[in-house]
Amino acid sequence: MTKKIMTGEIFSKKIMSKMLEKRIIYCPSHGNVEVDVFKGEADDKAVCPYCEKINEARHTAAIEKMRKLEAMGLYEEHYEAALDNFFPPTQKAKAHLEAIKGFAKKPGRKCLVFYGNSGTGKSKLLSALVKELGGKYTTYEWLNLRIKSSYSPRAEYSEEKIFKELCAIPFLAIDEIEKGPDKDRIEHLSFIIRERYERHKPLALAGNFTWNWLKETFDGSIINRWQCAGQSFEFDWDSYRSNLRGE
């Protein structure tokens, strides 16, 4: 079988060699280069082999970048999110951004909380931090769905394995924590907050809620951890989405 394949390859190469010819073409980037072209084909149809390799490398890099961003759990609209391309609309937002940049340089065991109005950039900043620190972004609803799926007899991951992963990754951002069943949400988030705090792993939580809602939802020990080793940021400016709708 191997001999037949090799014979077929040799035969194919012989046919191609009769159909192709060597030519010198001019490439604006690489000067005069030798290329293989089909006999009778115009020079402008030929492609510079060096440019072709560069384009292939760029394409491969773009696919790899996309794969990494998807693995981080980011939404496509936030693929280009970065702390440097977030433009604060108010002085308060500017102060928040500087503090968040400081956190990114030395996160330690801190837990950030972004709360306030909808459409004010909380999700974008979470995504930027995930890219900066190398972690994972999820909404609570998706997290809850993943945990529930572990209860199936055919589940690939157990609930224990899911929580171990969530408590071990370098940085975890959970968005929209106000959504989902109250009992499950409080138990899941409280466990993650405590474990990541004890493991000295940074965490960020966000959603469209108030500080009072947060205090009423979590017990005193969790609030105490935030006060000792956390930072909270209120996003109380107008929504960016109203501007987007007007474009």
Image (spheres, rainbow, N blue to C red):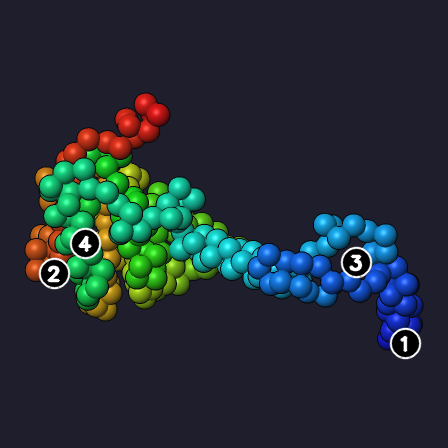
| Sooner in the amino-acid sequence: mark 4 or mark 3 | 3
Q: Secondary structure at mark 1?
A: helix
10 Å crowding of disc 4: few (<14), some (14-19), many (20+): some
Q: How far apart are the alpha carbons under marks 4 and 3?
A: 56 Å
At a point 72% along the width and 50% down the height, the residue shown is 44
| Tag 2 residue | 229
Question: Which amino acid type corresponds to the residue marked 1 in the rendered image?
Answer: Lys
Q: Secondary structure at mark 3?
A: strand
Q: As displayed, is residue 151 above or below residue 170?
A: above
| Tag 3 residue | 37
| Sooner in the amino-acid sequence: mark 3 or mark 1 | 1
Q: Mark 1 or 2, which is nearer the eye?
A: 1
| Sooner in the amino-acid sequence: mark 2 or mark 3 | 3
Of residues 90 and 43, which is closer to you in this image?
Answer: 43
At a point 57% along the width and 59% down the height, the residue shown is 29
The image shows a total of numbered marks equal to 4
| Sooner in the amino-acid sequence: mark 4 or mark 2 | 4
